[in-house]
Amino acid sequence: MGEATSKDRAQPRYDSSLPALVEQLLLNPASVLTAAVVFGLCRSRQTSFTELVNPWDLPLLWWVAAYALLRVALLGFVDGSVWVLGPLLPPLPSRTGPKPVFQHRINAMDVTYLTINSAIEYVFTQQILHLLWHAPFIVRLPAGLGLLNGPVAFWLLLVVDDSMYAPTHRFMHLPAVYRYVHKHHHRNTFPARGYIDAANEHPVEQIVALSLHWVAVHIVALSAGLHVAAVGAHFGFKALGACFNHTGYDVQLRFLGIDYSVRAHETHHRKPNTNFAQYVMFWDRLMGTYRNYESGQPKLAAAVEASAGQGQSKPEPDRLPAWADPAVEASAGHICEGPGTD
Ligand SMILES: [Zn+2]
Ligand SMILES: [Zn+2]
């Protein structure tokens, strides 16, 4: 225990005190700007804050009950899927070495962000259900489901959403911007806790990402046409994708230009200026930011290269490449690989 404690001390400290929380949440230019944009949008649409957070006009008790119900349903769906599918999946090559992967402890800042983000998810879910129920440009009847507004629209939602998300994500990594919003999500160099690590981000980031989702729904609906089933499938696919992206399971899905792999997102956490997209890596290839996965384990990397026949990455002499070295990561303000924790 004594050894673990001394090594814990070697990890960069992350200030989760109340003043730090207030500074990050409220005295943050990104938060002020987001609040101003939301306020401006509400004013221009003559929507009150109450209508924004409660579009179905539910009584308070029902509103709270629906929040609890959604929490249980969402966690059951994403964490349940990880729980059921996880044992059937291989681990990422980076997670199979003798050294355990360090996980930072969940602190007060994390809990606050996760709580606020769960409320934002709830409001967004209410708003999208309201849109699906009322919008004239959404097809709702089962008989109205077709190739274009179903499978094609689902594919388009992924492509359009990621085409906006990838550059936005890259913008959040600009040195002048990074510390205000996105830095928190990168506390984890090897995310492993699924939903908790996926949703552990500054609330502004959550609002921005869900706004892009909202815009993508409108773009696809008004161009190709959109059936409610495609919106549901996209929502579910993204929820699962975000969750698995923050586990150590080696999930890879490739079809029709969709290129989802947990490897790509782990690479992003290990080498933050790469792989900004999550479902369509074409956007990274276009921006010149795509990076192949490197396990850091020579034998495994060689086996992967041999079996794939197209691997371009050079095996590393150790499990962690130089840029994921604890000392390097610590000097960059990141927390990374550490010994002897879960
Ligand atoms: Zn992430
Ligand atoms: Zn990032």
Image: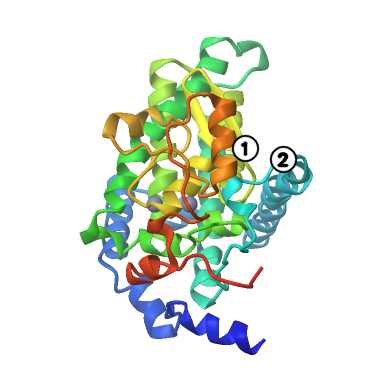
Disc 2 C-beta below 8 A from ligand 1: no
Secondary structure, mark 2, is: loop
Secondary structure, mark 1, is: loop
Disc 2 residue type (three-letter)? Leu
Judge whether 181 appears above or below 84 on screen: below
Callout 1–callout 2 Cβ contact below 8 Å: yes
Residue occupying image coordinates x 64% and y 45%: 249
- From the viewer's perspective, is 85 left or right of 159? right
In x, y percent, where is residue 19? 38, 84
Q: Quadrant of the C terminus?
A: bottom right
Q: Earlier in the sequence, mark 1 or mark 2?
A: 2
- From the viewer's perspective, is 73 left or right of 179? right
In x, y percent, where is residue 256? 50, 17
Q: Quadrant of the N terminus?
A: bottom right
> Residue beneath label 2, please?
89
Disc 1 residue type (three-letter)? Val
Disc assigned to residue 251:
1
In x, y percent, where is residue 87? 77, 45
